[in-house]
Image (cartoon, coloured by chain):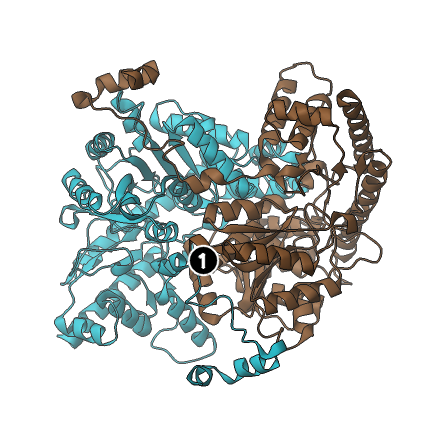
Chain colours: A cyan, B brown
Amino acid sequence: MRALRALRPRRLLAMAAAPGGSRRGPVLTPESMNPAIRRVEYAVRGPIVVRALELEQELRKGVSKPFTEVIKANIGDAHAMGQQPITFLRQVAALCLCPELMKDSSLPSDAKERARRLLSACGGQSVGSYSASPGVQMVRENVARYIERRDGVPASPDDIFLSTGASDAIVNILKLLVCGSGSSRTGVLIPIPQYPLYSAALAELDAAQVRYYLAEERCWALDVAELRRALDEGRRRCSPRVLCIINPGNPTGQVQSRECIEDVIKFAYEEKLFLMADEVYQDNVYAKGSAFYSFKKVLKEMGPPYSDSVELASFHSISKGYMGECGLRSGYVEVVNLHPEVKAELSKLVSVRLCPPVLGQMVLDTIMDPPKPGDPSYERFQAEKEAVLSALAEKARLTQEIFNRTPGIHCNPVQGAMYSFPRIDLPDGALAAAKEKQQAPDMFFCMRLLEETGICVVPGSGFGQKEGTFHFRMTILPPTDKLKILLEKLSAFYTKFVKEFS
Amino acid sequence: MRALRALRPRRLLAMAAAPGGSRRGPVLTPESMNPAIRRVEYAVRGPIVVRALELEQELRKGVSKPFTEVIKANIGDAHAMGQQPITFLRQVAALCLCPELMKDSSLPSDAKERARRLLSACGGQSVGSYSASPGVQMVRENVARYIERRDGVPASPDDIFLSTGASDAIVNILKLLVCGSGSSRTGVLIPIPQYPLYSAALAELDAAQVRYYLAEERCWALDVAELRRALDEGRRRCSPRVLCIINPGNPTGQVQSRECIEDVIKFAYEEKLFLMADEVYQDNVYAKGSAFYSFKKVLKEMGPPYSDSVELASFHSISKGYMGECGLRSGYVEVVNLHPEVKAELSKLVSVRLCPPVLGQMVLDTIMDPPKPGDPSYERFQAEKEAVLSALAEKARLTQEIFNRTPGIHCNPVQGAMYSFPRIDLPDGALAAAKEKQQAPDMFFCMRLLEETGICVVPGSGFGQKEGTFHFRMTILPPTDKLKILLEKLSAFYTKFVKEFS
């Protein structure tokens, strides 16, 4: 009887009408669903973004707010923040979709030539046909040549698997690696702070996080001593066999030195770890004295035994860099020293999803093999690319400068990637108020910031941070003028917030 | 010492050079990798297709073969077989990518108008920005209106989740549903023959297959008595809670009657099963007297208790139908009666992968809301659509007719979808020869067919079939003239094969 009372009227009605009066609740409830999926969290599109979307709708309905616009600085979504797409790659994509545009005289001949070549590599000359599951062969070859030019060491198209954004490839490689339960459960070393795709995928795949901390006081450097500490800790409860690195860092923006990468590779060699190098921000390096070195290059240049035994998967994407084509969902993984039979298993795994979006593959091709000097589109391509990258460099500088002017905000230089991840001192009063609301203190801060200014950033707790420290991640993507206002508004809000809770 | 001898020279060298002489084999080997991934099989792109690709390369190198061309009738890839894309949707997509084409006077005004509206629904007016994770709101609304027109019952955009092809959505729904181990492991009822995405996903997610057989002798009909038999069998070893239906059938081509759908819904209600309805071939119905009824329509029209309690996920895609845009990877799922908190979990799950390809969403929009009478593109759109569908109907008829002329080949009518799945009698000699090669008998047949004729079809064993029966799946997609030659070639090969092994 008590159980019946707890049911809502509509369910009672349904039960009454059921043949034989049998009870028939839903099959799928929060209690009966896959608990691994329940454990998944993804802060970049978490509760704060849900609230931001609600606020946008309220504004549209004419509800009065202390701001006129919600600014989503939560996600690395360049075009949404006004960055213009690179013309050449859009022209090629449009021509691939609509070959009748070949007769449009406003489109340059090299775009037409490229589209023709790409279409000839598609089944039935159509981007509407499936490609081979690891991607169009011609594109894989161009990716290999791009890597060779970048690194100065050989690359093979057979080691390249195109993907639906880098996320897809990252999860596929993790799927191969995770297994076991209890103390033999696969452990995966991830940086803290990390990009929450990693924690989400590990939750879903029921693998163990092994957290190594980046050294905030030294510009988020990666220390092998800390890797060792984390590994020792992990070995007490699981079987760590993967080491993930994000370089340039997300959300932390550091760019690793060549020496650091060598140390990490030696560590992976000695401790028998599979390396996953998330290198999607490889074109986004701004700081003087910083340069991008791929793990593949360093690994190969180190020579044996490293170069021919350490297993590496390196990820790249068209979503970041100067192109910012997130919506097309395209990326790739290069696998190095992967066991041939495991590579065959990877081929099989990707075949189940048929193929990555073919148009994204076409656009990836234009990035891997951009117009060359003398080509009709060369000047425009270069000018557009430089304009984006130099604006990002300026915004990286500006962010650090304005934040560090404000007492209580500590912002490391944004050496690369697209985010700042400043530390904020929060007064005890704010910690108490957050506790009362059952929120993480930085979530409490970010929610207040959103409600009062319309600025949407992601609390550091969504990425992980040292116990007792608080941060937020904010993109550097808004247009320079707007970003300046934003940074000043945010700093002023922070000062007011601290005063309120002190 | 024996272990050392087994190593190849290169590995020995690496070991010798290792600091401290420590052994360092690969982290990831066939033995140490995730066993769930090893168990995955996907026949549509399995060994026979690998061999087909090799043969193509051999032909290109000038190797002499008894054929001049490999014909891939293994996969529902319409454009690859020469089907032309629908012009309107390609125009809209090209305009979305390259808004500077708005000034191209050869493009129709309604395509421009649609592209403008779609772009205004994108962040920064660019298809390069991420959409909301469940898809662009405007597109979700158009999907809901499409479903309402199709079914005559209400649909809500909140229940629509756009996806990277239907496969992506199917796997996401399964992810929510599967859990447990041993006798409480989730069981999923799947038809036999089935589309192997289901078996592959269940292997990966470590859920149990519960196989119900379609009645070949009655045109692949689905019987509730057989569902009950399968369920009873499944309950002895797992916890069945999902029932998958493919309608129109893949690979079997049957179209379910309304009565059958009602019976299935009652069964799902009584036995507390979650329904997954794979309806991606809903536009592909050819047989006189056959019509597509969606599970949603039937469920809602049945009224309570069914309409407000049976949980249903229905899948659709732009890859099939008359558009055949497989390469753009776009589809959706509509969820019905899903627990609100579970729906929130689904929203969270899809957010980890950020969003489905945005350009595919744009194209989905043009299919959900096609040009109307009076619009500049209406006549062309309709003419292209009808041309594709009537050609497919003719090819469905032709396939059945030619196969059934051949003694030993038994082909049910292709009422819908894009495949025939004929049964072939194989002589004992062939079974013995296959056994010797450790191949399934139908794999042996299909491999021989490929080697001798260049025709690539998929053995029935990849889809499942009644013990002791043999089939293959062949698409009806090649151009009519070519298909005719193909069918006759295949029939002649079969007759010769039977003679050889009798």
Whether residue A74 can be seen here: no
Chain of the residue on which disc 1 is drawn: B
Where is mark 1, residue-wise? B184
Classify residue B406 by image quadrant: top right
Quadrant of the snapshot with the C terminus of chain A: bottom left
Q: Residue B393 placed where, x, y %? A: 81, 47
> Height in image: A340 above or below B295?
above
Q: State the residue at coordinates (53%, 64%).
A: B137
Drawn side of residue B28 relative to residue A327, left or right:
left
Residue situated in front as seen by the camera: A70 or A36: A36
Q: Residue B109 placed where, x, y %? A: 69, 57
Q: State the residue at coordinates (51%, 73%).
A: A25
Q: Residue A311 placed where, x, y %? A: 33, 30
Whether residue A487 can be seen here: yes
Disc 1 packing (10 Å; few <14; some 14–19; many ≥20)? few
Q: State the residue at coordinates (40%, 33%).
A: A334
Drawn side of residue B164 relative to residue B287, left or right:
left
